[in-house]
Image (tube, helix red, strand yellow):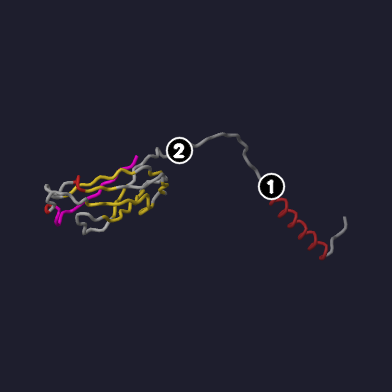
């Protein structure tokens, strides 16, 4: 057997270390398996309610009209459609008859996005009809326009 030179021994040592490093890095173990699964969640039931608003200026007098703006707030997590609006009038004074007032709502199907407020859903007019009756009971009365949707 021949003796290795110092240079050969260093080269052999470096090669051995490299071989162990490469071989050690390539050695690995793993488990194999099979599997299956699924997930599920229930969708929104939809059909949540929106809050409708009627906005108009005060100061009506017999024979006058003011425009009415209708808006909707949708706090739900899904969009919805507001259809035909049905407005009605009430007052806070017994002698001030709601029949003296006419309110209209010109609307169509309007999409109201989820988590929105103040979406315009229509417009109309509030009229205080001039009656032959004494309408003094309506002086200072609070007129409320309520609105529903189908």
The x, y position of residue 69, in whole percent, is 32, 53
Residue 94's label in the rendered image is: none
Secondary structure of residue under mark 1: loop
Closer to the camera, 51 or 61?
61
Q: Residue furthest bottom?
A: 7
In the image, taking residue 39 as reference, residue 102 lies left or right, namely: left
**Quarter of image, res 83:** top left
Image: 112 above or below 47: below
Measuring from the top left, give residue 20's x and y in whole percent: 72, 53
Residue under label 2: 41
Residue beneath the point at 18% across and 53% down = 142
Q: Residue at x 72, y 51 (%)?
A: 23
Q: Secondary structure at mark 2?
A: loop
In this view, the residue in front, 37 or 59, is 59
| Residue at position x 80%, y 62% in the image | 11
Q: What whole-number distance in Å separates the C-alpha atoms at marks 1 and 2?
A: 43 Å
Q: Is residue 31 magenta?
A: no
Q: From the viewer's side, name the closer residue of 83 and 99.
A: 99
- Ranked by sequence position, the earlier of labels 1 and 2 is 1
Residue 18: image x %, image y %? 74, 57
Quick one: quadrant of the C terminus? top left
Q: Is residue 80 at all visible to an observer of this figure? A: no
On the question of residue 85 being in view, the answer is yes
Residue range in magenta is 138-150
- Residue that badge 1 annotates: 27
């Amino acid at each position: 057997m021949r003796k290795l030179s110092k240079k050969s021994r260093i080269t052999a040592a470096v090669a051995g270390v490299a071989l162990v490093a490469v071989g050690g890095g390539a050695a690995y173990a793993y488990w194999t398996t099979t599997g299956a699964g699924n997930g599920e969640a229930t969708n929104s039931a939809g059909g949540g309610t929106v809050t409708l608003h009627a906005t108009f200026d005060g100061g009506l007098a017999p024979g006058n009209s003011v425009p009415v703006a209708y808006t909707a707030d949708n706090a739900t997590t899904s969009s919805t459609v507001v259809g035909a609006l049905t407005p009605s009038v009430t007052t806070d004074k017994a002698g001030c008859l709601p029949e003296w007032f006419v309110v209209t709502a010109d609307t169509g199907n309007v999409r109201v996005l989820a988590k929105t407020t103040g979406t315009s859903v229509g417009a109309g007019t509030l009229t205080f009809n001039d009656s032959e009756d004494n309408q003094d009971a309506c002086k200072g009365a609070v007129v409320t326009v309520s609105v529903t949707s189908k």
